[in-house]
Image (spheres, helix red, strand yellow):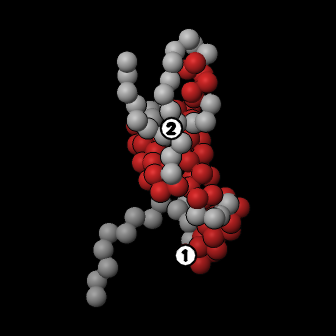
Amino acid sequence: MPTYNKLVRDKIPEIIEAKGKEVSTTILSNEEYIKELKTKCLEEVDEYMKATTNEEAKEELADVLEVLHAIAKTHGSSMEEIESIRLRKKQERGGFQEGIFLIDVKE
C-alpha cells in the first residue's frame, strides 16, 4: 500500500476510489494547508523544470498556476489582484521578455 502524505487535487480521492481502491485522507488546518501548498508549488515547478517538450511544459505550468490560485486565496487575495500587482511591477521594473542576464555591477 503506497503512502503519499501530500496535498492532492480535490477530485483525486474519488478518482482513486472509482478504480476500486480505498483511500485515507484528512483535511489540513490552515497552517498545514499553507505549508503543503508551498511544498506543492515547489513540486510543480520542479516538474516544469524536468519537462522535455512544449506540451509537457504547458501541462506543468497549468499545475503551477492552479497552485498559485490556491496560494493567493490563502493570503486573502485573488489572481486578479495578483495580476494587477504583476502589471504594476512590470510597468515599474519591466518584465522578462528580453532575456537580459545581469553579469555584474561595478561600484
Depth check: 32 or 76 in front?
32
Q: Quadrant of the C terminus?
A: bottom left
In the rendered image, which residue does mark 1 sit on? 93
Which residue is found at the position 65% from the left and 64% from the top? 77
Q: Amino acid at mark 2?
A: Thr
Q: Amino acid at mark 1?
A: Arg
The residue pinned by badge 2 equals: 26
Q: How far, Cα to Cα, is label 1 from label 2?
A: 43 Å
Task: Estimate the x, y position of residue 56 in percent, counting from the top left.
Answer: 52, 32
Q: How many marks?
A: 2
- Outermost residue on the right side: it is 80
- Badge 2 local density, few (<14 within 10 Å), some, or many (20+)? few
Residue sitting at 63 percent across and 58 percent down? 73
Q: Residue furthest bottom?
A: 107
Residue 60 position within the rendered picture, expressed as x and y whole percent measured from the top left: 52, 38
Question: Percent position (x, y) of residue 102?
Answer: 37, 69
Q: Quadrant of residue 50?
A: top left
Quarter occupied by residue 66? top right
> Can residue 88 be spotted in the picture?
yes
